[in-house]
Image (cartoon, rainbow, N blue to C red):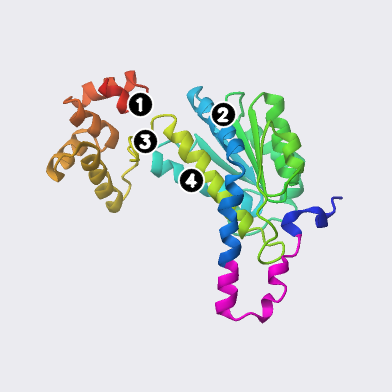
Amino acid sequence: MIDLSTLTTERRNTETYNLDQMSVHDALIKMNQEDQKVALAVSQALPQVESVTTAVIQSFKKGGRLIYMGAGTSGRLGVLDAAECVPTFGVAATQVIGLIAGGEQTMTVAVEGAEDSLELGRKDLVGLELSQNDTVVGIAASGRTPYVIGGLDYAKEVGATTASLSCNKNAEISKHATLPIEVDCGPEFLTGSTRLKSGTAQKLILNMISTISMIGIGKVYNNLMVDVKPTNEKLVERSKRIIMQATDCTYDEAEEKFEAANRDVKLAIVMILTDSTAEQGRAKLAKADGFVKNTLK
């Protein structure tokens, strides 16, 4: 059994020994000071994050998937990032997947022993029919979660790309991944509560991996999310505004092309920028592999 005292995420923070005696004001200031250390810690891991993101782009271009897997907070953050890719980038829910030990019910209620099962991690990936075109990112603040290790070992057997994200140096899961990321944010504000600094670091890095990989497959034009899905009134209006920002057209023209493109924002933009019909615009995008700028050449 691993000695938890060796993990940074389990150490006591000398800055907060008297936490229970602090005023609300002082506790908030101290927590904010601790949080400010997170972005700096993440910056130290950017070369490793770049390697993982590049691998994800390669997986997408081969028709593969990005699969996050973790337990507890780590698993929830993976599920969250995966879910948000669907409306933001217009991808299928099967392209970015979040697996959490114990299944969907553990998003709100802990399932005893789920994270301690090597076999469960393997089983969940078998259920997804994992292939060598996929990239699996195992997430564990402690860096030792058996569920994640079992999944990474199976992914290696299949030939999928394996990556890990932990908040301890020399993490156990790093030994089971080809592309490990390790971020040391220092001891938590509240001893052992890895939903705090560790969770924030994980959220930042998952945002990077998914967002930059989507840019790499043409889901962004300039800095606009042109594949956004207009699933509600707010997003319908945002879609029109994106069309206006991308083309300098009027609101009325954006609305007209938006409807003519069957509410496909990217297509509407190409139709305006290249003076094309919807059919012509689709052909241009197909030839350009979905990159708006490549339709302008």
Q: Which residues are magenta?
A: 11-31
Decide if residue 260 is on the left or right side of residue 92. Answer: left
Check if mark 4's residue and mark 2's residue have beta carbons within 8 Å.
Answer: no
Residue type highlighted by circle 4: Ala
Circle 4 sits on which residue?
Answer: 83
Could you say which is closer to the camera, residue 36 or residue 74? 36
**Between discs 2 and 3, the one toward the N terminus:** 2
Residue type highlighted by circle 1: Gly
Residue displayed at 42% across by 36% down: 91
**Residue 241 at x, y = what percent?**
24, 46
Residue type highlighted by circle 2: Ala
Circle 2 sits on which residue?
Answer: 55
Residue displayed at 33% across by 34% down: 221
* 169 vs 214: above or below: below
**Residue 66 at x, y = what percent?**
55, 34
C-alpha gap between disc 3 and disc 4? 18 Å
Task: Specify few, some or many for label 4: CA neighbours under 10 Å numbering under 14, 14-19, or 20 or more.
Answer: some
SS under mark 4: helix
